[in-house]
């Protein structure tokens, strides 16, 4: 079952069920009535608003998904703490920031481990868009606690996330500081993807129709690449490795050969 089908389970009013590689796991969460295939749930942390550098990104992303794809996306963001009993109702989580943050509690680490074991997908996004930022240091510290002994690796460009909707061979964001995504692999799945290029800053819109931030150094071409990468990441979060199925392999290969250089 795809993660988008997981959300449809809730829309039918079933109990909290999560997909894992071993099957379905029952959690003591309450059923929710959901009319969207995608809900943007963002992790809140600390006592201030350091967790919220791009406050309207969920709305901007929903506009993109609703206009370019067949995925009905909610324009409203869900803000959730790792200690919340509703954590296991959301198979997609997003975490962002610019600066260092306090370590998660041991209980929060254990809950995140259970959430990942149950089939959750996390997108981490460094809003500063620079190597060795405070957020980067803190995130890598927490990932080492969540995934002990599992290495954060570069995501190769033949990974499913680069062909889940658009065919891509590079990454981008508001900046182009790091030429790759990072990920944690578990078998043939990648339940965590990390961008250091401020993906949210590339798509967040201002009060009007324009975008809030300039994209450097590549301008609007770089922004379009970031938009496409967002779509691919969401499709991967919802559908995982379906594009690796044999039925898609020859089709993707032909498309790559026809794609202009």
Image (cartoon, grey):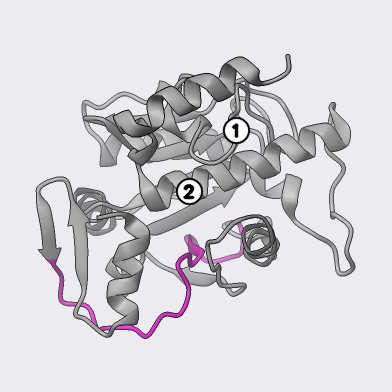
From the top left corner, tell me how far across and down residue 3 is, in percent.
33, 57
What is the magenta range? 26-50
Say if the magenta span includes residue 36: yes
Residue at 28% in and 67% down: 88
Quadrant of residue 130 within the rendered picture: top right
Residue 20 in the figure: left or right of residue 235: left
Residue at 30% in and 29% down: 246
Frontmost residue, 53 versus 247: 247
Provide the major secondary structure of the magenta segment. Answer: loop
| 10 vs 169: above or below | below
Tell me the crowding category of disc 2: few under 14, some 14 to 19, or many 20 or more residues within 10 angstroms, Cα based: many
Residue 121 visible here: yes
Frontmost residue, 189 versus 81: 189
Q: Which residue position holds label 1?
A: 196
Frontmost residue, 252 versus 92: 252
Residue 153 in the figure: left or right of residue 85: right
Q: Which residue position holds label 2?
A: 235
From the top left corner, tell me how far across and down residue 125 is, in percent.
56, 43
Mark 1 lies on a secondary structure that is: loop
Residue 141 in the figure: left or right of residue 259: left
Q: Earlier in the sequence, mark 1 or mark 2?
A: 1
Frontmost residue, 113 versus 215: 215
Tell me the crowding category of disc 1: few under 14, some 14 to 19, or many 20 or more residues within 10 angstroms, Cα based: many
Q: CA separation, marks 1 and 2?
A: 20 Å
Residue at 59% in and 26% down: 132
């Amino acid at each position: 079952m795809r993660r988008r089908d997981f959300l449809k389970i809730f829309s039918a009013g079933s109990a909290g069920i999560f997909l894992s590689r071993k099957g379905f796991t029952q959690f003591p969460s309450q059923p929710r009535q959901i009319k969207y295939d995608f809900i943007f749930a963002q992790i809140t942390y600390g006592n201030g608003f350091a967790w919220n550098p791009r406050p309207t990104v969920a709305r901007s992303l929903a506009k993109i998904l609703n206009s370019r794809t067949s995925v009905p996306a909610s324009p409203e963001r869900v803000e959730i703490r790792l200690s919340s009993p509703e954590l296991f109702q959301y198979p997609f989580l997003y975490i962002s920031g610019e600066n260092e943050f306090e370590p998660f509690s041991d209980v929060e680490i254990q809950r995140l481990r259970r959430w990942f074991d149950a089939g959750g997908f996390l997108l981490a996004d460094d809003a500063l868009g620079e190597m060795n930022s405070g957020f980067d240091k803190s995130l890598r510290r927490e990932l080492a606690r969540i995934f002990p002994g599992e290495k954060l690796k570069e995501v190769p460009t033949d990974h499913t996330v680069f062909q889940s909707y658009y065919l891509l061979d590079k990454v981008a964001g508001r900046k182009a500081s790091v030429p790759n995504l990072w990920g944690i692999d578990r078998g043939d799945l990648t339940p965590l993807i990390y961008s250091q290029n401020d993906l949210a800053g590339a798509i967040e819109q201002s009060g009007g129709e324009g975008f809030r931030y300039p994209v450097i150094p590549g301008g609007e071409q770089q922004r379009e690449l970031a938009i496409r990468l967002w779509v691919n990441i969401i499709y991967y979060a919802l559908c995982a490795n379906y594009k690796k199925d044999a039925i898609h392999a020859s089709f993707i290969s032909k498309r790559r050969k026809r794609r202009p250089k």
